[in-house]
Amino acid sequence: MLVTNCISGSLDPYVPSEERPWNEERVKHLYRRLQYGAPPQQISEALALNPTDIVDQLITEAVNAPLPPAPEWATWAYSDYDDFFPQQEEQFIEWIIAWVREMKNVGLREKLSLFWHNHFVTQIETYICPSQMYSYHTLLRTFALGDFKQFVYEIGKTPAMLVYLNGVENTNEQPNENYARELFELFTLGRDNGYTQEDIEEAARALTGWVGYTDYCTGIDFVPLAHDSGEKTIFGQTGNWNYDDLNELIFSQRGEEVARFICTKIYTYFVHPEANELIIEGLAQTFRDSNWSIEAVLRQLFKSEHFFDDYAIGTLIKSPSDYFLQTVNTADFPVNDELMQAITYYTFILGQELFNPIDVAGWPGNRTWIDSTYLTVRWETNDGLLYYLYQNSPEVFVTLAIVLTQDSNNPEFITRKIIDYFIPHGLNEESLYDNATAVFKADVPQNYYDNGQWNLSWETAAAQVALLLQYISRFPEFQLY
């Protein structure tokens, strides 16, 4: 289904004006897109700052964020296990939960790591080794904002990728085209864009030789005897090309195609599901001019007047990870292991099993997150999350309402402020606010509101806010960010 992109503005830096003020709506937009939302205090502090400075700060923090400590099993081979499959499952779950925690705490780098995980796809159900999962994930984090050309070079040599796309079976006697095909189609150029079947076949020959196993779950080395050392013709260029040469050829011979393809993916992930060709062209030029710096592209995009345009706000559908983590971050709920486990499980239920995208093309995203099956499951899992949060941190619901309303005792005002805080652009009809207010009032008799006796200190207040959040989570607008 075509979604019209009405976003205006160029890649020039956003300068607040009367027409486009630096307001709460734009601040929330920035934090929803670059990380997983932000609590009211952080939003208030950001309003006093320059938007360009905040973008620079968030990106610099992501670039400099230290990697989490390696788990004890980070280098384990198969022979290091007492009982491989039970231990493997335990380590797999441990690392996924740890990643969800980092998504909440680190923000942009982890959001980008997830983006690249859905670009350079592997599936642990294929390679099964936790140590290979760890090395693959660490590479995603290391290059999340780095040198894309070097990123492509390194990703093809990771054991997870070599096993997943059959590079470990690619020899001079039996070339395997699987990785070469996806390298062009999914990782660098895009489908049917600047290459032929013959280019794939010749590229597969250049990639031969990465078959050196010593033990299962260890690294995979290059074996010269398994490499095809004959001449190959790729993109019309003939030579005795190898792995390194192929990487150079992609960027030297098809640089424009690479830049447009990757910038389009970044744009449709962070801005709008329909690409703006003029904006893509500008980003692609920056990508090439910066020698393939992902960071340079992101700084230009996220500072731009285009990114902060009104029509850019609320145009993307939340992924499962966004859906749950934005709720937790926006209300500033305390985090513990049990909550992280719950969110990890809920994202899995909604179709986003980390380290296991649905296929080599990854999760399609956007509208596919809310088909007829997943939409009702979203409501049910969100109910579960809100119930857990209410049982464990009821005071946070009240604090949120107090902060957003300056401790108002007006149920209509409280309802509107909470809705507008969680839903981009708010609701279009007053009747919807009226209905939501009725839900918020719950079973408290009307006379307590009329005479001003009710306030947010009442013992029912936490449950009332939780019920309101449950109610508005059914709105179509709640699915957007």
Image (cartoon, grey):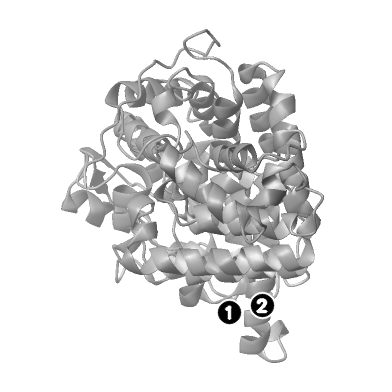
Residue 137 image position (x, y, % from top left): 60, 57
Secondary structure at numbered mark 2: loop
Secondary structure at numbered mark 1: loop
Q: Residue at label 2?
A: 77
Q: Which of 458 and 342 lies nearest the eye of the viewer?
A: 458
Quadrant for residue 463, please give it. bottom right
Few, some or many residues within 10 Å of mark 2 (<14, 14–19, 20+): some
Residue kind at label 1, given as amino acid type = Tyr
Residue kind at label 2, given as amino acid type = Ala
Q: Which of 4 and 158 lies nearest the eye of the viewer?
A: 4
Taking the spot 28% from the left edge, 62% from the top edge, the residue there is: 177
Taking the spot 51% from the left edge, 62% from the top edge, the residue there is: 222
Does residue 121 show up? yes
Taking the spot 54% from the left edge, 77% from the top edge, the residue there is: 128
Q: Which of 50 and 429 lies nearest the eye of the viewer?
A: 429
Q: Residue at label 1?
A: 216
Q: Which of marks 1 and 2 is nearer the N terminus?
A: 2
As measured in the structure, the alpha-carbon distance from the residue carrying label 1 to the one carrying label 2 is 6 Å
Query: In the rendered view, does 441 fall on the left or right side of 392?
Result: left
Query: In the rendered view, does 407 fall on the left or right side of 158?
Result: right
Q: Are marks 1 and 2 in contact (CB under 8 Å)?
A: yes
Few, some or many residues within 10 Å of mark 1 (<14, 14–19, 20+): few
Residue 367 image position (x, y, % from top left): 34, 53
Q: In this view, does 431 lie above or below 12?
A: below
